[in-house]
Structures are given as structure tokens and as C-alpha cells.
Amino acid sequence: MKILLLLCCVALCPALEVIEVRWGFGAGPVPDRFNPVSVLVGNSSTEVFEGELVLRRDQLVGGESLVRRCYLAPSTQRWVPFPVYFGADQHDWRLAWRSARESDAVELHAPNFVAPSIALIDDGRLSVSGLPRYPSALFPLDAAWCDGLAVACLDAVPRFDAPQRAAFIDWIAGGGVVVLLQGDDQAWPRFPAAWGPLAAEDGVYGAGRIVRLAGTAREVDLDALVARAELESLKLGDGSGHLDADWFFQMLREQSKPDHNWAIIGLLLVVYILLIGPVAWALGRRRDYRLVNGLVLGSIVVFSLAVGYMGRRGYGEASAHHAVTVARMVAPGRYLVQQWGDQFATIGGVQALRFEQPAAFSSGESYGESGGRVDLDAGAFVVDIPVFSNRCFVAAGTFRGPDIVAQVLDPGVQAAGSHVKISGIGRIQGGWMVRDGVISTVLVTDGNELWAKSQTMSFESFEVEHWSRGDLLREDIARAAVAAGSGVNEALARPWKRASAGRSDPDMLWVWTRDESFVLNEADAGKQMVVYQIPLESEEANDE
């Protein structure tokens, strides 16, 4: 009897248990961004768990399911990472697991939204620190998940594996700030050559910056760090006030509106009514009823096909992938990409949306219309798209792209660095230049030569509250993309926002163009706008 009761208890006890959940890099996730959500799960049973972990919003309908395959030996535990896009609304979440042996789920309470974090990347050595800490073992493998991290503090070389180290360096190049602190022995961290910019001198790297701050992690608290490292302008507030995905989705849906020839469709309907009405009645009085039935059935078939054909003509007879993309250059030919996309389908059914490189996907909406499954191991968004309908999504990843070269030319009588030639992409439609913390619009001439205009503009001018119908390739859409995807907003400030007379800040270009570099696999490119963020080297670097 005791053995039977023991077996029953083992059968009723779930194999997995959720031990801890970490939302983002700090006290919570950043809204309208992909954030790393790390779940520590343990297997307390005597059986191996081999199955799927499924994370989704805890609501009755809508919202995508994030799926990861998991293998966990008996009496072990491991961290499982999920790249999660948080919309403007807060929700509880649900983590489910299923295997051949069992299935179960737990509820996860809604986290609080925060602004991008300042965190000490810690290996667990320190028992006391005045700075918020983030475990080095949990650092994401893709820098596209790291927009929730504003400043990373290091007092030692982190214990990263090669993909984590590459992601960390990409994060710096994309706009991150690294503050180097002294260790307990008062020595600065010594980085091997594989750490690239961290092994070299401090200063600007891409769109990011590396600075040194005297003191140890035990001695420096958050307020002192912000003041002494000149980070006041980061405005670490509640993370609210920027554009959400719905803003872009409304505009993208407009690109798939049909342009039907209503005159021909109306004429077809009139002829159809005449055939099955007066003509069929007249034939029925004089001829065999079977001829009338054939006429009616034939008219139904022919005119159904004709009207359907004209309807497809209104959609261009092809599926299309429309998108607004922000691509931040982190190395020649490599970009941190965030895309707001819309896939329109003329053939309905289940589709697997994916890029050439793995990407994180989301429906981007707090209440998704038809759910979907994000296979994180395959980097695909599997979703059912009905015929002649569309599905919006947000995607982020580190992608290969065009090898863009920005060459600073002789400025002549203009300010230094105000004349730049861009090669490697098609015709540039417009853009903005940042030099010494000052933004100027640029004049585009033949050959993609850019001249910075004398008048400057404020960061607030990139905020676009309302969109108007029309073509996708417009300056207001480009400004909105820069604000949402490159962190111009005060609540999501990038390091180049902080102008200081005694310090060198990153200089860069934003240029926007019609580009098909980041189109879904097996999809027809529709209307595509790409905003490139391109770092500019200093005059000294060009002289060398």
C-alpha cells in the first residue's frame, strides 16, 4: 500500500517547477522593446524531462506563444531564455510545459515597466554592491534583445562564452555605454584581445562609448555613477511616452489596400443579373428548361471566377511583405535590426515567417488577433493568415546587410565632417547627421553625397504623434522609425544624446531609403523603408 501511495504521489507531482523569473535587465522590462526574460526551472522528479516550454500572455484569446525545447535531467535546474516583446499594456503571463509524459502550467504576475537599466554585470563574486546587478550567465546571445540595457558596469572580465561576448560588443557598437570600475584590488579590468574595443583605449566605439570611473562596485552607488560618468541626460524614468507597434501597424495595413476597378466589376454584376434574370426568363418561355438551368449555372461559375479575378487584380495578384526597418550598423555588413512588418497573403493557410538569420518575433499587440507560435529554436513565426488578409509583426535580430561605407570628405568652407559620401546602398532619400551631440538635416546630392545643413533640429522633433495616409517612403515615417528604433525618445535615450564640452561623443548618420535587404524568406518584397544608423569616424581616424 505504501509503495502504491508513493507511486501515486510521484505521478501527481509535476516534473518541472519554476524557481525564479527575471524580467529584463533590472526591476522589470522596457515597453515596446524586446527584453530578455530568464526562467529558472528545476526538475525535481526522477525522470528526464524532454519537451517544450511555452510562454504566453495569460488571456483568453490572442497573443503569440513563445516556444522553446528543453531537456532537463533528474534533480537538475537550468535557466531558459525567452526574447519577449512587451507592448504598451501590462498583463499576467503563463508558462506551460508539455512532454510525452505530462503537461502543466504556472501563472506569472505582470511585471512593472521600467526605463532602460544601469546594471553591474556580475559573476556572483560580490556580496555587497551599491549598483543593481545582472548575472553574467544570463546575458543574451543576441544584442537585439538588449535595448533594455542602457549602461553596463564592469569591474572584472565577465565570464561570457563566445556568442555572449560577440553580442556584448555588438550592443556597445549599437549605442551601449560601458563604465569600467576598479576591482577590489584597485586594479582595472584587463581584457584579452578577443574583447575588441574593451581591450583598446577608452572612448567611442561605433554608436557607443567606454569610460573609466575610479572606485569599486562596493564604493560607487547609482547616483554617484550617474553624476560622475555624466549620464544625467539618460532620464531614467518610467519608460513611457514613445511610439508603440500599433502606430506602425496602422500605417502598414494601409499599404495593402486594394485598388479595384469598380467600373468593370459593376459592369460584370449588371451583365450577370441580366443573364440570370430577364435573359433566363425569356429563354424559359421559348426553349427547354435544361438550357435555362445550364445558362444559370454557367453564369454563376463564369462570373464568380471573373469577379474573383478582378478582386485579385486589385491586390496586385501577389503576396507582399511591407516593412519599416531600423538597422544599426555594428560592423561592416552587420546590423542590429528592428522591423515592423506586415505580411499580406493571397493564398491562405499556415505560414512560417522567417528571415535568413534567426530572429525574435512578436505580434506586437497586447491583444493579438489570431495568436501564432514563435519557434525560438528555429527563429520562425508560425501563424495562420486567411486568404486576402494580412498579419503584422515585430521582429528583431542581428542580420547581414549591405556593406555600407561612409567617407568623410573635405568640407571646404563648411564645418568639419559636414560632407559625407555614402556607398554600398541605393539612392538615399534623406537623413540626419549627428556631430558633437548636434543634429542637422542633410541635403542629398547625386552620387549619395550628403551635406549637413546649417540649421539644427531638436531630438523632440523626431516624435511623430499622427500618421497620414500615403506612400510608405516619407520623412515623417523615417523620423518615427528613428524615434522608436534608435532611442531618440527621452525615455529611451542613447549615449550620443549627452553633449559635454570635455568629452568625445559618437558621431553618426541616419539615412533612409527604399531597400530590400531585410525581407522575409520566400516573400515578395512590397513597400520597404530602411533607416540605417551609420557611425562616422572622427577626422583623426580618417587621417590615419
Image: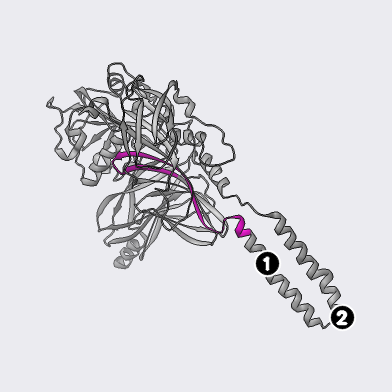
149 or 532: nearer the viewer: 532
Res 237 quadrant in image: top left
Residue shown at the point (31%, 63%) measured from the top left:
6
Q: Amino acid at mark 2?
A: Arg
Q: Amino acid at mark 1?
A: Ser
Label 2, label 1: how far apart the Cα atoms are: 27 Å
Asked if 292 appears above or below 426 in the picture, the reply is below
Quadrant containing the C terminus is top left
Asked if 542 appears above or below 7 in the picture, the reply is above
> Which is in the foreground here, disc 2 or disc 1?
2
Asked if 188 appears above or below 59 in the picture, the reply is above
Residue shown at the point (61%, 58%) measured from the top left:
313
249 or 320: nearer the viewer: 320
Res 511 quadrant in image: top left
Q: Position of residue 53 (x, y in %)?
A: 37, 55
Mark 2 sits on what residue? 286
Is residue 531 located in the magenta-colored stretch of the structure?
no
Query: Can residue 542 be seen from the camera position used here?
Result: yes
Q: Main secondary structure of the magenta part?
A: strand
Taking the image as shown, residue 202 lies to the left or right of residue 16, namely left
Q: Residues within 10 Å of mark 1 (few under 14, many from 20)?
A: some
Query: Can residue 62 be seen from the camera position used here?
Result: no
Q: Position of residue 510 (x, y in %)?
A: 40, 33
Residue shown at the point (54%, 53%) measured from the top left:
390
- Write the start and end of the magenta stretch as one range: 311-339
Residue shown at the point (61%, 55%) measured from the top left:
314
Is residue 330 located in the magenta-colored stretch of the structure?
yes
Mark 1 sits on what residue? 304
